[in-house]
Image (spheres, helix red, strand yellow):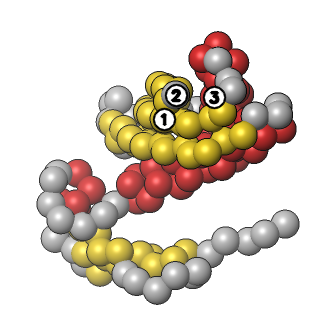
Amino acid sequence: MKKNEAYATWQGNLKNGNGQMRLHSVSGVFNYTFSSRFEKDKGTNPEELVAAAHAGCFSMALADIVAKKGYEPEEIKTTANAILSNPGDGYSITDMELYTEAKIRDIDDTAFQSLASEAKQNCPVSRTLSSVNIRLTARLIQ
């Protein structure tokens, strides 16, 4: 089992405070505030990092599934949008939108869509987000 570590600090109250997140594996600081999370201010937020994790995980899972089926993945680009909503009982990520484009040799769109759906269901971050409505739009680039 591999353990992955990240760090976060927060100073002050929710509305006027600020925080920093760090990843164990790379240098750099990700600043976040109430405004960067709930409004459109500069900085990141936890949901953006979840979206980045999901985009990376999905791309890797799709590459693996495609290769195991005998196709050659050339490039997979994925964008993920984590939708933070308050349905009335507090904030949560309610939806995740995955948009992927892939260059894969000698595959037709039907097979590609099936493999993309399989990757959506089986990447570890998708499994972790099993209570979230995950929508996938997959486009095969020839």
Query: SS class of the residue under badge 1?
Result: strand
Residue topped by disc 1: 101
Does residue 78 appear to the left or right of 68 in the view shown?
left
Q: Residue at x 22, y 60 (%)?
A: 36
Left or right: 98, with 72 as reference point: left
The residue drawn where x is 75% and y is 44% is: 64
Depth-wise, is mark 3 or mark 2 nearer the camera?
2
Q: Quadrant of the N terminus?
A: bottom right
Residue 15 seen: no
Rendering coords of residue 83 (x, y %): 36, 38
In the figure, residue 44 lies in which quadrant? bottom left
Question: Is 106 in front, or is 113?
Answer: 106
Kindly state the secondary structure of the residue where label 2 is placed. Answer: loop
Closer to the eye: label 1 or 2: 2
Q: In the rendered image, is residue 31 in sight?
A: yes
Label 3: which secondary element: helix
> Which residue corresponds to the image point at 78% horizontal and 40% vertical from the top-left?
67
- Mark 3 highlights which residue? 116
Three-letter amino acid code at disc 2? Answer: Gln
Image spot of residue 46 (x, y percent): 41, 59
Residue indicated by mark 2: 142
- Residue at image x 69%, y 27%? 106
Q: From mark 3 to mark 2, how far is it between C-alphas?
A: 16 Å
- Tell whether 113 sits left or right of 101: right
Mark 3 Cα-neighbour bin, 10 Å: few <14, some 14–19, many ≥20: many
Sequence-wise first label, 1 or 2: 1
Q: Amino acid at mark 3?
A: Ala
Q: Position of residue 50 (x, y in %)?
A: 48, 53
Q: Earlier in the sequence, mark 1 or mark 3?
A: 1
Amino acid at the residue labelled 1: Glu
Asked if labels 3 and 1 touch by Cβ distance under 8 angstroms, the answer is no
